[in-house]
Image: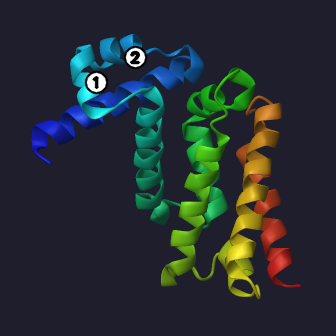
Amino acid sequence: MSQVTQRTKKNIIDAMISLLEKKSFEKITVADICTEAMINHSTFYRYFTDKFVLLRSVFAYLLDDLISNTNNAETIVAQIADFIETNNNFMRHISPQYQTKANLYPEFRSILKDLVERKYKEPESQDDPLIQTIITSDTPELMISFIVGGLVGLVEYLEDHDFQVPMKEFTGFAESFFKKWSNL
């Protein structure tokens, strides 16, 4: 992929992220994206077939960013909490309560699953209480699915409270839970 292609694609992704900071996914149009990215419609359609395909690219980009910043947080839960706090409006605007046609949590769940699976395979993450819970499980794949479901549930709890729950409360609860679980 040429540098121009990479730069244009990233520009479109950044435009979508910027728009999701301001309004819900459902209210964003391709025209809005084109205006924000300062491109024409044909350029948009050269890279993406619709805004849903673009959103998948946004999630992939954010996952890569989340994983690349792993060293900034002691645990996966702290990393996720930091991501939610940093991207508060983005999370609010992809949440199901703002959508009538698009439930974007399956995409978010997929991101969390990828993150947990990657961390599970990294030797430097083996001390993380969440990873210890997976390691000590007789069925790691099932445990990963259970954990991801729980993390999505915690995000839904945050959503129900308009993302106003203090992050220390969120991380404290989750990390305490996984420490207790791994010591069973």
What's under tag 1, amino acid-wise?
A: Phe
Question: In this view of the protein, can residue 24 be seen by the observer?
Answer: no
Quarter holding the C terminus is: bottom right
Instruction: Name the residue: 59% across, 27% down.
Output: 89
Instruction: Name the residue: 67% across, 33% down.
Output: 103
What's under tag 2, amino acid-wise?
A: Val
> Disc 2 on helix, strand or loop?
helix
In the image, residue 68 sits, relative to residue 165, either above or below, namely below
Towards the viewer: 34 or 136: 34
Q: Position of residue 69 (x, y in %)?
A: 44, 58
Towards the viewer: 161 or 44: 44
Instruction: Name the residue: 22% across, 23% down.
Output: 43
User: Which colour scheme appears in the figure?
Assistant: rainbow
Question: Is 126 placed left or right of 159 in the picture?
Answer: left
Picture quarter containing residue 6?
top left
Mark 2 residue crowding within 10 angstroms, few (<14) / some (14–19) / many (20+): some
In the image, residue 87 sits, relative to residue 74, either above or below, namely above
Q: Which residue is mark 1?
A: 44
Instruction: Name the residue: 41% across, 27% down.
Output: 50
Separation (CA) of disc 2 from disc 1: 8 Å
- Residue 30's label in the rendered image is 2
Question: In this view of the protein, can residue 36 be seen by the observer?
Answer: yes
Q: Are marks 2 and 1 in contact (CB under 8 Å)?
A: yes
> Disc 1 on helix, strand or loop?
helix
Q: Give the mark, 2 or 1, whose residue is nearer the N terminus.
A: 2
Q: Position of residue 143 (x, y in %)?
A: 74, 74
- Residue 159's label in the rendered image is none
Q: Position of residue 159 (x, y in %)?
A: 76, 34
Kindly give the residue lying farthest to the front in the view shown.
49
Question: Is 112 placed left or right of 46 in the picture?
Answer: right
